[in-house]
Amino acid sequence: MAVLVNGLACKDPKNFQASHFSFSGLHLAGNTSNSVGSRVTTVNVAQIPGLNTLGISLVRIDYAPWGINPPHTHPRATEILTVLGGCLEVGFVTSNPENRLITKILQKGDVFVFPIGLVHYQRNVGNGNVVAIAALSSQNPGVITIANAVFGSSAEIPVDILAKAFHLDKNVSFMDEPNYQNLENRNLIKRYIENQSSNVKEKVKQEHHEDIPFSLLSYKCLHLHIFDGI
């Protein structure tokens, strides 16, 4: 009978091979041709069985120009990230009731820590690619992408709950654009996103003296917006 530790079967030490403690391919760039412009390559217990119970894992993150790693949490790990090349904006939000945003622009060689369980993100703020390596304090840190969890759950969270939580008009659909049922609401959301993208573009340009391709800002990780004042 197999003994499970952290949900994985323990292997007989006599049967361990070098392959149980190694991984190849972290030198290869991840494919960032997706809606957020980033790719995470994980090296955890799923890739290296010998990591089980050791409390450590690794990821490589590739970012296209102005790509993001959208807001997410790791429920079982603190993360320490270092930038190998490029310029990366990072940030995390403290817990209730303060909800302070702690943010910094990192250059090559800079290191930043995301405490366990806190919502955090990264964004490439340059016109070139960025590569980062991060270590996590669990062999199976887990990841919860906020937008996916809240708006993409297998059974939808009731609209009235979302409306109260985010102070939104409950008649507005919260799903991705193809699922919007109301054309007026869809156009309202589109106009709002375009306005916000222009504002962000100008702000980042002023702060970092670089221009942003508008298409990379529009609709990127914008599953939710506050409609007050529109």
Image (tube, grey):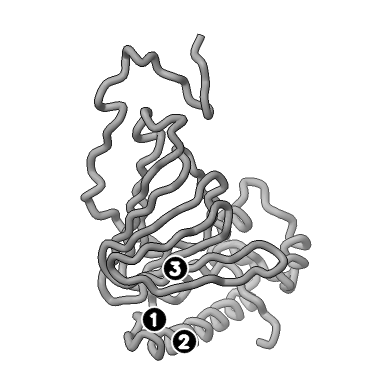
**Which amino acid does the dot numbered 3 rest on?**
Val
Q: Position of residue 2 (x, y in %)?
A: 49, 13
Q: How many marks?
A: 3
On screen, residue 106 versus residue 102, left or right, reads left
Check whether the beta carbons of the residues at disc 1 and disc 2 lie within 8 A of each other: yes
How far across and how far down the image is residue 58, in percent? 37, 46
SS for callout 3 = strand
- In the image shown, does 22 or 181 lie closer to the viewer? 22
Which sits in the foreground, 32 or 143? 143
Q: Position of residue 76 (x, y in %)?
A: 54, 44
Residue 110 location, quadrant = bottom left
**Which residue does the image show at 47% across and 21% down from the upper left?**
9
Residue 184 higher or lower than 177, as above or below: below
**Within-10-Å neighbours for mark 2: few <14, some 14–19, many 20+:** some
The residue where tag 3 is placed is: 90
Is disc 1 placed on a helix, strand or loop?
A: helix
- Which badge, 3 or 2, is on the more N-terminal residue? 3
Residue shown at 57% from the left, 71% from the top: 101
Does residue 124 appear to the left or right of 162 in the view shown? left
On the rendered image, what quadrant is the C terminus found in?
Answer: bottom right
Residue found at the very far top of the displayed protein: 1
Q: Quadrant of residue 148?
A: bottom right
* 211 relative position to 28: left or right: right
Residue wearing tag 2: 198
Q: Please tell me which of labels 3 and 1 falls first in the chain.
A: 3
- When the figure is inspected, residue 44 is found, relative to residue 75, above or below; the finding is above
What is the three-letter code of the residue carrying label 1? Phe
What residue is pinned by disc 1?
A: 214
| Crowd around label 1: few <14 · some 14–19 · many ≥20 (10 Å) | few
Q: CA distance from mark 1 to mark 2?
A: 8 Å
Marked residue nearer the N-terminal end (1 or 2): 2
Q: State which mark lies toward you, 3 or 1.
A: 3
